[in-house]
Image (cartoon, rainbow, N blue to C red):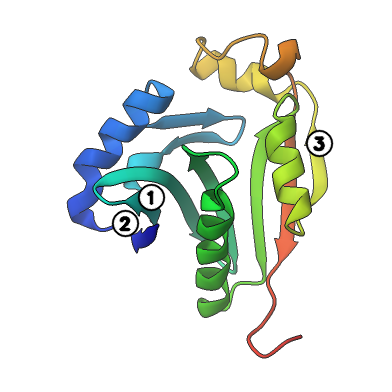
Amino acid sequence: MIITEIQESDRTWLREFWIKHWGSPKMVYSLGVRHCDQLPGFAAWDGQEVIGLVTYDVHDDQVEIVSLDSLREGAGIGSSLLAKVEERAAQLGCKRLWLITTNDNLHALRFYQKRGYFMTKVYPNAVEKARQIKPEIPLLGNDGIPIRDELELEKLVRSKGAS
């Protein structure tokens, strides 16, 4: 696996990746619409094949992880991509990493918590607001759990040299 930083020349295949895996490069959540094919990020490659992708956005001294996809579960792809974003946040002098996921995404909740992220906020019924923009967001998610709430998770950035 090789991880590369997303370049402007990658925007075409990024758009295709998002359409293939998510139906659209737009991510809609209660805070608004994100165009994931236009964000900075990192891609994991196996030869010429993209096997993982992370996108993020920098807000002042915070980094929002907007998306994280691993196409081969259990191979360390998601962890490696997340580590790259955490390194970037430290390089930029950011204090906090954060993300939003939905209440049904138990896999993501497990993944992030095992890597030092903790829940900081619950936005009850927030997905209804997102459905006003993107009505195709399903009512039921993973394991038949109704998709209703958004959960915010965060991790504080360790400064370089901290142990």
Work out how far the residue at label 2 is from the one at label 3, CA to CA, in angstroms.
31 Å
- Indicate which disc residue 8 carries: none
Work out how far the residue at label 1 is from the one at label 2, CA to CA, in angstroms.
9 Å
Front position among marks 2 and 3: 2
Residue that badge 3 annotates = 122
Residue that badge 2 annotates = 6
Residue lying at 66% horizontally and 82% vertically, measured from the top left: 159
Name the quadrant of the C terminus: bottom right
Cβ–Cβ under 8 Å for marks 1 and 2: yes
Cβ–Cβ under 8 Å for marks 3 and 1: no
Query: Residue 88: percent from the left, percent from the top?
Result: 50, 70
Residue that badge 1 annotates = 39
Tell me which numbered mark, 2 or 3, is placed earlier along the sequence: 2
Which class describes the residues within 10 Å of circle 2: few (<14), some (14-19), or many (20+)?
A: some
Which amino acid, mark 1?
Leu
Which class describes the residues within 10 Å of circle 1: few (<14), some (14-19), or many (20+)?
A: many
Name the quadrant of the N terminus: bottom left
Where 32 sits versus 57, above or below? above
**Along the horizontal axis of the image, is 128 left or right of 133?**
right
Q: Nearer the viewer, residue 66 or 53?
A: 53
Which amino acid, mark 2?
Ile
Which amino acid, mark 3?
Val
Residue lying at 78% horizontally and 50% vertically, measured from the top left: 113
Which class describes the residues within 10 Å of circle 3: few (<14), some (14-19), or many (20+)?
A: some
